[in-house]
Amino acid sequence: MMRAALNESNESVESLLSAAGVLAVAEVRQAAEAVSVAEALLGGGVRAMEIAFRDVRFFDESERAIAAVRERCPQMLVGAATVINPAIADRAAASGAQFILSAGFNPKTVEHCVSRGLPMIPGVCTPGEIEQALEFGLTTLKFFPAEACGGTAMLSALSGPYPQVRFVASGGIGASNAAAYLACGNVAAVSGSWVSPKSAIARGDFAAITSLAAGASALAAARRTGG
């Protein structure tokens, strides 16, 4: 049975993401591995993560990973990423994903999610795509690829004509520039794999992930306190 929206709304997801400040990108291949990553992230203070549907060979494991994290780490906000069509969105929702992310703006996927009450954060990088999203009532969007599309300067430019829009900035963001993005008034959160790198996951070095998460959560905390 599809756990559609899981009692989350777009507004509550935006609020939770903004409070978290950092959305960790976790490329995992097994459910147990995903739980270990989630526990390591939480240990460092990062409370939001995304699990990708990038390789069709591992879609079943992505589903199991989301379900396992929801069950074992209920304090973690879990999204499904790289959702490129409605069928994947349904699989993600059925597994327990609390929100859906995409790298681009696919009107069919967006319409499908919106019509089913699934919190959706589509990828945009142009004013035209932002206005398409607004037509669907969406005001929290993924700015991707952030660095390649003008970075913080572009976000500043977009804040004028679209003051109601907040972004999850992703693409080329790491420890060295995350603070600059978090300082943008229209950024709800930053997203990246630097917090839970594939290399650390592959070697089972979850202590390293906790350390990286602590650094990332400190950046988010500094934004909240104005530091």
Image (cartoon, grey):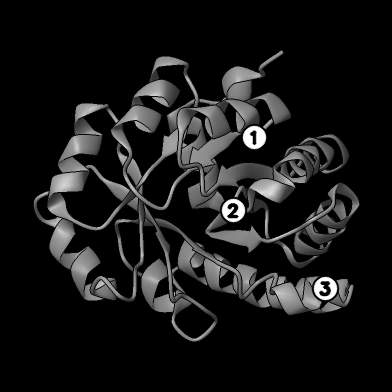
Q: Which amino acid type corresponds to the residue marked 3 in the rendered image?
A: Ala
- The local secondary structure at tag 3 comes to helix
Q: Is residue 70 above or below residue 53?
A: above
Q: Which amino acid type corresponds to the residue marked 2 in the rendered image?
A: Arg
Residues tagged 1 and 3 counted as in contact (Cβ below 8 A): no
Q: How far from the left and from the top, in percent, is residue 126?
A: 18, 56
Q: How far from the left and from the top, in percent, is residue 148?
A: 30, 75
Q: Nearer the viewer, residue 89 or 11?
A: 89
Spatial CA span between label 1 and label 3: 23 Å
User: Residue, x 80% and y 38% (percent of image)?
Assistant: 64
User: Mark 2 or 3, which is nearer the eye?
Assistant: 2
Spatial CA span between label 1 and label 2: 15 Å
Q: Which residue is mark 1?
A: 97
User: Residue, x 19% and y 36% (percent of image)?
Assistant: 132
- The local secondary structure at tag 1 comes to loop
User: Residue, x 58% and y 25% (percent of image)?
Assistant: 90
First in sequence, mark 2 or 3: give its number: 2
First in sequence, mark 1 or 3: give its number: 1
Q: Which label number is shown at residue 54?
A: 2
Place residue 145 in its image quadrant.
Answer: bottom left
**Mark 3 Cα shell of 10 Å, populated few (<14), some (14-19), many (≥20):** few
**Would residue 224 be found to the left or right of residue 149 on screen?**
right
Spatial CA span between label 2 and label 3: 17 Å
Q: Is residue 122 above or below residue 96?
A: below
Quadrant containing the N terminus is: top right
**Mark 2 Cα shell of 10 Å, populated few (<14), some (14-19), many (≥20):** some
**Would residue 226 be found to the left or right of residue 68 on screen?**
left
- The local secondary structure at tag 2 comes to loop
Q: Which residue is mark 3?
A: 202
For the view shown, which residue lies furthest in the left direction? 161
Residues tagged 2 and 3 counted as in contact (Cβ below 8 A): no
**Would residue 213 be found to the left or right of residue 82 on screen?**
right
